[in-house]
Image (cartoon, rainbow, N blue to C red):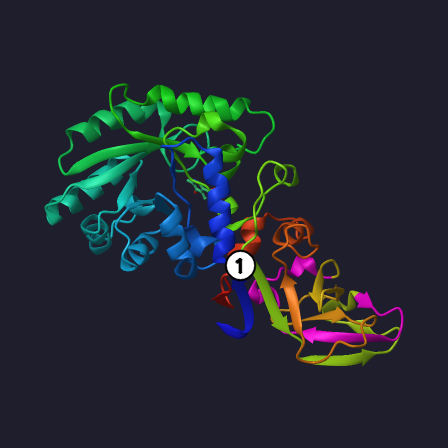
Amino acid sequence: MKNYLTASISASAVQHNLQELRKKINPGVQLCPVVKDNCYGHGLNLLYPTLAKHADGFIVASPSEALEIRSYGYTGFILCLLSAYFDETDIQEELIRQGVTQTVMSKAALETVAAAAKRCQKTAPIHLKIDSGMGRLGVAAAQATNLFSLIEKTPHIQLTGAYTHFASSDDPDTTYMHQQLNTFLDVLPKNNPLTRHAANTSALIHHPDTHLDLVRPGLSVYGCHYAEHLRSKINLRPCMSVYAQIIAIKKMPSGSFSGYGRTHQYPRDSRVAVVPIGYGDGYFRSLSNQAVVHIHGKPAAVCGRVSMDQMTVDITDHPQINIGDPVEIISAHATAPNSVENLAKLAHTIPYEITCHMGRNLHHKLVD
Ligand SMILES: *Cc1c(COP(=O)(O)O)cnc(C)c1O
């Protein structure tokens, strides 16, 4: 971890986002944030208290994330999206002892969980994952009925829920999403009070008919929109800003070059700041010669290629800027040119990838 790179994380922004999301769902629908990949790179340890207070449960990807939440003292609902694939005896048993709900999507996974539950002399809560058209994890809808009856006959297993995941809930044409929803609902047993869920962020915000009994927002919890047109639909506050400091300033004569590949030539005598962040820290190389950072609120262009651990920005127009000055790499204002959303656009990727990468090397601290 690099202590000189700071990700400032706002728990009050997350609280605000959860409250805004809550307004979109009916009372009784459970709001369970997705906290996989360390809260999309924001820091589960920092956000846990706020999430625990304002959410009805947690959705995690890996067993270690589930156990981390239990280690904070959380006793409520935790669903692990991937766990039953890992046939590691001690992990399975620990999840069952800790009352973590596991995803089952096949006969093999069912047998793994049931065997572990039997060894612990416990009953394991599970949710059945149904592939209604995403083509990823989940039992094919056509085989779901068989798996439901197998589950019913399996001791040490308690089926408490069933879910599916949309492939394109952000598509303005909702035909495919509604096909998926119907496929999912059609294969559910009729007289079983299961917790049914399907909605990620975009389905939650756009399509109330997908809310069912529980919603699983991820990106929106951390205040990012994955598409511009959603901004008017809900008022979210990004919860991360990223800072570095200028470690060197140099004068570059007109006609000289910047960085690998000499992709930038200074058109005039220039003043350039070296900032110690690069693609190894999650600042994408595709932002080279494209993005801006802010220094004392003023934009400074990234000039030349972003290297692994440093980059250069042009401060010719800002003579008052000095070594040691803070550089705002990512702004928590959604519309700033250096917001997560705008950087994602420049880098031809999605906000998710930007925040996840920012989670690796930076020193995360809570600011409010
Ligand atoms: C990541 C994930 C989500 C959350 O998606 P967002 O678009 O971030 O809201 C929901 N459900 C599943 C199964 C996921 O893997």
Say whether residue 61 is visible: no
Residue 326 relative to residue 12: left or right: right
Horizontal and vertical percent for residue 210? 45, 28
Dividing the picture into quadrants, the one containing residue 189 is top left
Give the quarter the ligand 1 occupies: top left
Residue 246's place in the image compared with 33, above or below, is below
Dividing the picture into quadrants, the one containing residue 343 is bottom right
Q: Residue at x 26, y 26 (%)?
A: 193
Horizontal and vertical percent for residue 108? 25, 38
Is the residue marked by circle 1 packed among few (<14), some (14-19), or many (20+) residues within 10 Å? many
Residue 11 relative to residue 334: left or right: left
Q: Is residue 277 magenta?
A: yes
**How many dots with numbers?**
1
Q: Residue at x 70, y 65 (%)?
A: 294
Residue located beneath label 1 in the image: 357
Residue 299's place in the image compared with 21, above or below, is below
Q: Residue at x 26, y 40 (%)?
A: 109
Horizontal and vertical percent for residue 216? 42, 40
Q: Amino acid at mark 1?
A: His
| Range covered by the magenta-colored residues | 264-288
| Mark 1 CB lies closer than 8 A to ligand 1 | no
Q: Is residue 89 magenta?
A: no
Say whether residue 270 is visible: yes
Mark 1 secondary-structure assignment:
helix
Horizontal and vertical percent for residue 229? 65, 37
**236 or 41: which is nearer to us?**
236
Residue 185 relative to residue 88: left or right: right
Residue 63 relative to residue 344: left or right: left
**19 or 143: which is nearer to us?**
19
